[in-house]
């Protein structure tokens, strides 16, 4: 009976190959590298329950020597094997999602601004569809002033003002929903 039990234990050990274990360890070390690379404000948002891991990440952030940093990152990977990395991975995924949403909002605002610059009054319908609480009179005033500002050479400053206004609209729309 013990011989069969030994065979079963060996089968379980053979299920995960050495290469797969190395890939898993490298993935944990990569997760640790992402933690080290985060700005302090974003790192504070990641749930790291293990105090040793938190200290190791903080230490790695201060290390400037390449060899020392590599060893510290390996140590972080080792510490991560002893904890459940799911909350950390979820926290990093949430940060990535926020960054993606922020980039999408930036592109949406930029596109709307460019539409107003090129199409003028024809673009107002699209702008009001996106931001119904936008002041149409203010946008029309901007459209009328745009050629004058281009002639003066103030096109960039004028475009930045419009971008800021659209960004405020976009931010207030997020608050309303």
Image (cartoon, rainbow, N blue to C red):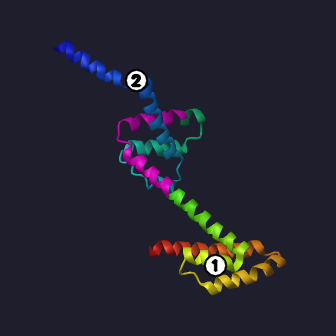
Quarter where residue 115 is shown:
bottom right
Compared to 6, does 54 lie above or below? below
**Image point 42% across, 46% down: which residue?**
89
Quarter the N terminus occupies: top left
Q: Which mark is residue 78?
A: none
The structure residue drawn at horizontal position 77% and vertical position 74%, both measured from the top left corner, is 155
* Label 1 neighbour load within 10 Å: few <14, some 14-19, many 20+: some
The magenta segment: 70-97
Residue matched to label 1? 124
Residue drawn at (56%, 65%), measured in percent from left and top? 105
- Vertical placement of 107 versus 160: above or below? above
Residue tagged by mark 2?
17
User: For the residue labelled by badge 2, is the local secondary structure a helix, a strand or a loop?
Assistant: loop
Residue 13: % across, % down? 32, 22
Q: Nearer the viewer, residue 48 or 136?
A: 136
Of callouts 1 and 2, which one flags the residue occurring earlier in the amino acid sequence? 2
- Residue at the spot x=53%, y=79% of the render? 132
Q: Is residue 142 magenta?
A: no
Location of residue 100 by image quarter: bottom right
- Crowd class of label 2 (few under 14; some 14 to 19; many from 20; radius 10 Å): few
Relative side of 6 to 166, left or right: left
Compared to residue 48, the image places residue 147 above or below, namely below
Q: Position of residue 86 (x, y in %)?
A: 37, 45
Q: Position of residue 106 (x, y in %)?
A: 60, 64
């Amino acid at each position: 009976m013990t011989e069969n039990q030994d065979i079963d234990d060996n089968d379980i050990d053979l299920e995960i190959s050495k290469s797969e274990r190395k890939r898993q360890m490298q993935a944990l070390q990569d997760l640790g590298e992402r933690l080290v690379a985060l700005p302090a404000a974003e790192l504070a948002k990641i749930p790291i329950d293990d105090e040793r891991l938190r200290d190791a990440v903080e230490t790695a952030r201060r290390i400037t020597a390449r060899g020392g940093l590599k060893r510290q990152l390996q140590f972080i990977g080792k510490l991560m094997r002893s904890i459940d990395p799911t909350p950390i991975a979820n926290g990093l995924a949430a940060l990535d999602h926020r960054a993606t949403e922020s980039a999408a909002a930036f592109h949406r605002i930029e596109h709307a601004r460019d539409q107003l610059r090129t199409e003028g009054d024809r673009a107002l319908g699209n702008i009001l569809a996106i931001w119904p609480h936008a002041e149409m009179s203010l946008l029309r005033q901007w459209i009328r002033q745009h050629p004058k500002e281009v002639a003066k050479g103030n096109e960039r400053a004028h475009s930045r003002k419009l971008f800021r206004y659209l960004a405020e609209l976009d931010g207030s729309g997020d608050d309303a929903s």
